């Protein structure tokens, strides 16, 4: 199928065969001549099933596959592999995106026919006929599979049963309000320099894999190997080197509120410096589901534009069959930006990143540097985001990271939900961390008014905590 990858064809065939809601759109949109050989045989039989029963074949798909195998006995193993592959991917299809790909294919084919016919008419001097041919081609290629959603439609209240798909962060106070990576949304994490931006993205990648999502980590700062190291540490809790490890634990009441906290020792963990660490890591990774679903791609600092990122995503789909559920960009401030109009162009980059999220039906997460005032502030807020404040208007969720010297000594930090388009914001979550083990968050609790008093007592200091609110 010219213009569609084999992965997209397989996904569309899965919808046609197993999805009673979207399969009809595939049936109505794609003619049989659009499918490649083996896909076409199954699509023909699935289409006939739709015409007769007005629903997807579902469990009868195996019957269709066996019918194809009987008709072409020499190709029976191919059909069996196709069926097994369809079963393995049917639960993880980015349906909206592949339907959009099919739509673009149909539009392209229709326009090609119209342009070819118009060119022929122009050669004969028939200007009016050429214009009419182009007009017919444009009119016959729909812009979408659906005119939109009406509140009277059965699917309008789908959020009551299925919710909005949001990947976890591992922090209950954020997950309960949908502040993880979400399809068609842009998530921004702001922190001062060297304060955990990459670790936050690694943390999201880890939890996305737990949620069985496909993750693409694009790095413009760390190397691919460094990101891989951090991901291994996060997944397996491996320390960078042998050391005495500690963590701060929270004592909470029955309502989950912070009562006190204390520092305790962490039992010895494997370290990257251990002589047998390669064996330990390989054994550990074999127990982690979805490892092939995590891809790291390094680009030069300042050398990647949103257009080039889109082209790379297209190549990943066509050559690798990889369509991510979440895209992590580390980080957008380091993408290719016009130095003459830096702030204005940086704002454009963030808008185009959100456009990628919407167009491809994926979650996009990136980080941003806090400005000078944010570096000195006790709590980083919206207005501390670096360079262009329009980033805030573009994003759907904005979380900031703050940490005083006392907190750093205790392995504590605060996440402030500065902006949320879809739920409660302007609240703070206290987290305990262990970067030595690759853990962005070991435990978390909503901030309470007694926190600073508890911190002062634990640190054994009388003076006010460092940093100022601005």
Image (cartoon, rainbow, N blue to C red):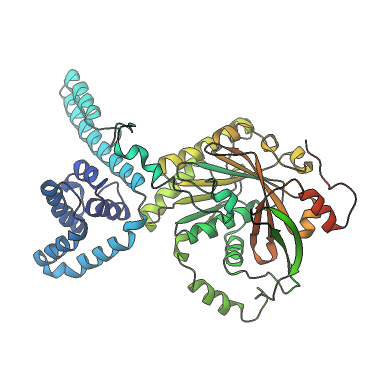
Residue that lies at the very extreme toward the right in this rendered image? 462
Camera-side residue of 173 and 57: 173
Q: Position of residue 193 (x, y in %)?
A: 72, 48
Q: Residue furthest bottom?
A: 276
Looking at the image, residue 148 sits to the left or right of residue 325; the answer is left
Residue 34 visible in this rendered orientation of the protein: yes
Picture mark count: 0
Taking the spot 44% from the left edge, 53% from the top edge, the residue there is 324
Q: Residue at x 20, y 65 (%)?
A: 79
Q: Along the horizontal axis of the image, is 301 left or right of 125? A: right
Left or right, residue 336 beside residue 165 = right
Q: Is residue 405 visible?
A: no
Q: Position of residue 316 (x, y in %)?
A: 41, 54
**x, y percent for residue 186:** 52, 41
Residue that lies at the very extreme toward the front in this rendered image: 254
Q: Quadrant of the C terminus?
A: top right
55 sits to left or right of 235: left
Looking at the picture, tell me which residue is in the foreground, 96 or 150.
150
Residue closer to the observer: 118 or 28: 28
**Residue 385: % across, % down:** 67, 38
Quadrant of residue 77 in the image?
bottom left
Image position of 179 with respect to 245: above or below: above
Q: Who's the residue at 17% across and 60% down the image? A: 60
- Above or below: residue 274 compared with residue 258: below
Check the image and report above or below for 178 versus 131: below
Residue depicted at 26% across the width and 47% down the height? 2
């Amino acid at each position: 199928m010219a213009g569609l990858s084999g992965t997209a064809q397989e996904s569309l065939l899965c919808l046609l065969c197993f999805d009673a809601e979207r399969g009809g759109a595939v049936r109505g949109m794609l003619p049989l001549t659009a499918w490649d050989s083996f896909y076409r045989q199954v699509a023909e039989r699935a289409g006939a099933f739709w015409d007769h029963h007005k629903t997807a074949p579902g469990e009868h798909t195996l019957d269709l596959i066996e019918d194809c195998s009987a008709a072409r006995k020499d190709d029976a193993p191919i059909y069996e592999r196709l069926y097994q592959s369809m079963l393995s991917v049917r639960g993880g299809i980015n349906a909206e995106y592949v339907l959009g790909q099919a739509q673009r294919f149909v539009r392209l084919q229709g326009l090609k026919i119209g342009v070819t016919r118009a060119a022929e008419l122009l050669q004969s001097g028939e200007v009016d006929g050429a214009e009419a041919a182009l007009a017919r081609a444009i009119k016959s290629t729909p812009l979408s599979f659906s005119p939109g959603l009406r509140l009277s439609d059965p699917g309008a209240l789908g959020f009551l049963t299925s919710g909005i798909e949001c990947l976890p962060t591992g922090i209950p106070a954020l997950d309960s309000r949908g502040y993880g990576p979400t399809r068609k949304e842009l998530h921004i994490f702001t922190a001062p320099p060297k304060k955990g931006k990459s670790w936050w993205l690694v943390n999201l990648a880890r939890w996305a894999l737990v949620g069985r999502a496909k993750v693409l980590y694009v790095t413009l700062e760390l190397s691919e190997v460094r990101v891989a190291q951090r991901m291994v540490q996060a997944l397996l809790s491996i320390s960078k080197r042998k050391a005495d490890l500690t963590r701060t634990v929270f004592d909470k009441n029955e309502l989950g509120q912070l009562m006190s906290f204390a520092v305790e020792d962490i039992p010895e963990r494997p370290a990257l410096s251990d002589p047998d660490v390669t064996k330990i890591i390989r054994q550990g990774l074999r127990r982690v589901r979805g490892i092939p679903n995590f891809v790291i791609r390094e680009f030069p600092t300042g050398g990647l534009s949103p257009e080039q990122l889109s082209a790379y995503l297209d190549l990943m789909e066509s050559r690798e069959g990889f369509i991510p559920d979440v895209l992590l960009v580390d980080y957008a401030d380091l993408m290719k930006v016009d130095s003459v109009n830096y702030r204005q162009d940086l704002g454009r980059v963030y808008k185009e990143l959100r456009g990628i999220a919407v167009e491809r039906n994926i979650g996009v997460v990136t980080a941003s540097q806090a400005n000078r005032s944010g570096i000195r502030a006790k709590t980083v807020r919206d207005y501390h985001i670096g360079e262009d404040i329009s980033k805030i208007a573009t994003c759907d969720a904005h979380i900031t990271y703050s940490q005083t010297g006392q907190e750093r000594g205790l392995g504590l930090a605060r996440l402030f939900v500065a902006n949320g388009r879809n739920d409660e914001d302007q609240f703070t979550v206290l987290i305990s961390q262990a970067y030595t083990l690759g853990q962005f968050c070991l435990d978390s609790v909503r901030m309470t008014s007694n926190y600073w008093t508890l911190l002062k007592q634990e640190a054994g200091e009388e003076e006010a905590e460092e940093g100022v609110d601005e």
